Image (cartoon, rainbow, N blue to C red):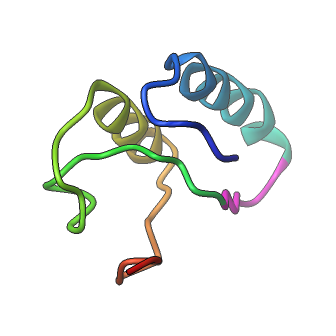
Amino acid sequence: MAMPPGAPSDHITSLRQELSELRPDVIGFIVMGDMNVHQQRWLIHSHSNTFEGSLLKEVCDDHALHQLIREPTRE
């Protein structure tokens, strides 16, 4: 999943719905991708806070997802 900065938040809403639908049938999730969201308290290398970052944080909290990458992926 890679979204350009400033893309509509529909992709995050869709992710929430898909995870909710799959949850009864699986023992866990692995979500990988460059999400292009920013939320400084959660994503420590973010330069700002965005609505999309806060929304994705809520989805991750609701489904017990954790960020495993602990260092910047570029520069």
| 45 relative position to 58: left or right | left
Q: Position of residue 63 (x, y in %)?
A: 52, 45
Q: Position of residue 57 (x, y in %)?
A: 35, 42
Q: Indicate the quadrant where residue 70 lies.
A: bottom left
Q: Nearer the viewer, residue 29 or 74?
A: 74
Residue reaching furthest to the right: 25
Q: Indicate the quadrant where residue 6 lies.
A: top left
| 47 relative position to 56: left or right | left
Is 39 part of what is drawn in magenta? Answer: no
| 69 relative position to 57: left or right | right
Please tell me whether residue 58 is drawn above or below residue 6 in the rendered image: below
Bounds of the magenta span? Answer: 26-32
Q: Indicate the quadrant where residue 16 lies.
A: top right
Which residue is drawn at the image coordinates 23% and 57% (left, top)? 46
Which residue is drawn at the image coordinates 24% and 67% (left, top)? 45
Is 30 part of what is drawn in magenta? Answer: yes
